[in-house]
Image (tube, helix red, strand yellow):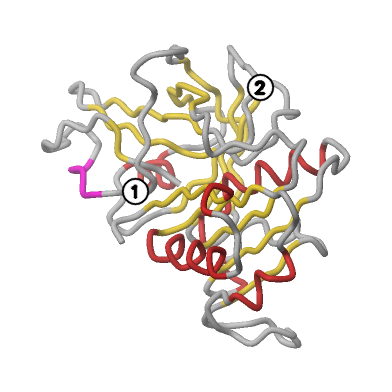
């Protein structure tokens, strides 16, 4: 997942193509409060997740534990000084000491995502800054319901992995929507706590027919006193939020992170 930050809006010679549009959720580092310094992270591993998404495992010289749901900013600088910055959610848990994992979906008109997919390999360095974010976060000690669509599952996976790493201290339920099994991120990591909803193609023998996420899907996942984290494209997030509200979930118990141009 990514977002445009501090873009000059001009052409991008020197190795970076022009900036097109939105890569993903619009986020900005806080104007005040904790400042984070840029640092050069070493790419330790590049792991293919789907045909369009890869996970970059980065070793950080100055590491601090993030809270699941937080993000880092990646900065690319061309030889002529042109810069492009994007924000990517952390997919790894804070117990993964010294490293973070960023899962990046390649977008057809994405600038930074295309560069990462085409030009970054293990051993390279990436300039990053973070972690950022204090609202769409989960510390693992209260009930949580996670609802993610497409690459919106990335920050939720950090929560899910934190939940597993800390011994499942609090109840957690999850719903993940994807167009097909081939486009499902982290496909081997889901258990009985997760409902998988495929909109266009389902695996053979699936008890759930293809189709959009429904209220009937989410109702069994609701937990008393839970905070509900919704992340995905603007249409998906709006749809999921409406479903939760329709099921009686209070608005102040729903936190939504949207990305994309709608």
The residue that appears at 49% across and 23% down in the rendered structure is 130
Q: Nearer the viewer, residue 138 or 13?
A: 138
Q: CA distance from mark 1 to mark 2?
A: 26 Å
Give neighbour class at mark 1: few <14, some 14-19, many 20+ (Cα, 10 Å). Answer: many
**Which stretch did the figure color magenta?**
17-21
Give neighbour class at mark 2: few <14, some 14-19, many 20+ (Cα, 10 Å). Answer: some
Residue 96 position, x and y percent, is: 73, 29
Query: Is 168 displayed left or right of 29 in the figure?
Result: right
Residue 19 magenta-highlighted = yes
Q: Residue furthest left?
A: 10
Residue 147 magenta-highlighted = no
Residue 24 position (above or below residue 4): below
Count of numbered labels shown in the rendering? 2
Using the rendered view, name the quadrant where residue 174 is placed: bottom right
* Residue at mark 2: 65
* Residue at mark 1: 23
Residue 159 position, x and y percent, is: 68, 42
Using the rendered view, name the quadrant where residue 178 is placed: bottom right
Query: Is 105 displayed left or right of 9 in the figure?
Result: right
SS at circle 2: loop
The residue that appears at 62% across and 63% down in the rendered structure is 176
Using the rendered view, name the quadrant where residue 248 is placed: bottom right
The residue that appears at 46% across and 14% down in the rendered structure is 36
SS at circle 1: loop
Residue 154 position (above or below residue 261): above
Residue 253 position, x and y percent, is: 58, 49
Residue 155 position, x and y percent, is: 57, 44
């Amino acid at each position: 997942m990514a977002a445009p930050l501090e873009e000059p809006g001009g052409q991008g010679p020197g190795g970076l193509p022009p900036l097109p549009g939105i890569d993903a959720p619009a986020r900005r580092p806080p104007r005040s409060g904790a400042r984070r310094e840029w640092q050069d992270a070493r790419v330790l591993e590049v792991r293919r997740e789907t045909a369009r998404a890869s996970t970059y495992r980065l070793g950080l010289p100055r590491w601090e534990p993030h809270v699941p749901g937080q993000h880092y900013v990646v900065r690319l600088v061309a030889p002529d000084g042109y810069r492009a910055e994007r924000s990517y959610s952390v997919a790894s848990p804070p117990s993964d000491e010294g490293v973070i994992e960023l899962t990046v979906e390649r977008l057809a008109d994405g600038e930074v995502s295309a560069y990462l997919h085409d030009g970054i390999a293990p051993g390279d360095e990436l300039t990053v800054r973070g972690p950022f974010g204090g609202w769409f976060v989960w510390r693992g000690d209260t009930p949580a319901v996670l609802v993610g669509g497409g690459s919106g599952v990335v920050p939720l996976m950090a929560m899910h992995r934190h939940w597993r790493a800390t011994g499942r201290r609090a109840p957690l339920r999850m719903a993940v929507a994807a167009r097909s099994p081939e486009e499902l991120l982290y496909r081997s990591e889901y258990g009985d706590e997760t409902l998988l909803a495929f909109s266009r193609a389902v695996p053979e023998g699936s008890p759930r027919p293809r189709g959009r996420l429904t209220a009937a899907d989410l109702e069994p996942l609701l937990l008393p006193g839970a905070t509900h984290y919704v992340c995905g494209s603007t249409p998906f997030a709006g749809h999921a939020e409406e479903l939760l509200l329709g099921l009686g979930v209070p608005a102040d118990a729903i936190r939504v992170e949207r990305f994309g141009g709608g």
